Structures are given as C-alpha cells and as structure tokens.
Image (cartoon, grey):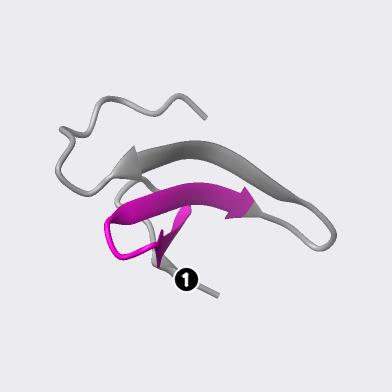
Amino acid sequence: MGRSGRVKGTRELVTWANYIIVYQENDNTVRILRILHAAQQWSEIKI
C-alpha cells in the first residue's frame, strides 16, 4: 500500500487529494509518523 517514502524505511500514501500520510509498517503494525498537506515544506522526520 502506498509508495516508497522520501525517508529510508518509510512509506507514503496520498489521500484526500492534497494530503500525504508518512508511515512505517511491519508484519502487524502501521505507525503513522506524520500527516502533511502537499504544499507544506518537508521537515526532518525522526524515526
């Protein structure tokens, strides 16, 4: 689900036309790291 993320070890899912959900997943857990509006500047994501 989603595409490879800009940060190693993450994935990204585009939703609601202009929002990007940045997340990590393993066998049984999805961890949402950040929800961004597509027009926002990307700040550092600490994993």
Disc 1 target residue: 2
| Residue 20 in magenta stretch | yes
Classify 42 as above or below 5.
Answer: above
Question: Hey, which residue is sitting farthest right in the picture?
Answer: 28
- The part of the chain drawn in magenta is 10-24
Q: Residue at x 18, y 36 (%)?
A: 40
Residue 28 left/right relative to 41: right
Q: Residue at x 41, y 63 (%)?
A: 15
Classify 45 as above or below 37.
Answer: above
Q: Position of residue 22 (x, y in %)?
A: 45, 48
Q: Residue at x 25, y 26 (%)?
A: 43
Q: How many marks?
A: 1
| Residue 23 in magenta stretch | yes
Any part of residue 9 in sight: no
Q: Quadrant of residue 1?
A: bottom right
* Crowd around label 1: few <14 · some 14–19 · many ≥20 (10 Å): some
Question: Hey, which residue is sitting farthest front in the picture?
Answer: 16
Residue 37 left/right relative to 16: left
Q: Secondary structure at mark 1?
A: loop
Residue 10 left/right relative to 6: right
Judging depth in this view, the residue of 34 and 28 nearest the camera is 34
Q: Position of residue 20 (x, y in %)?
A: 36, 53
Principal secondary structure, stretch drawn in magenta: strand
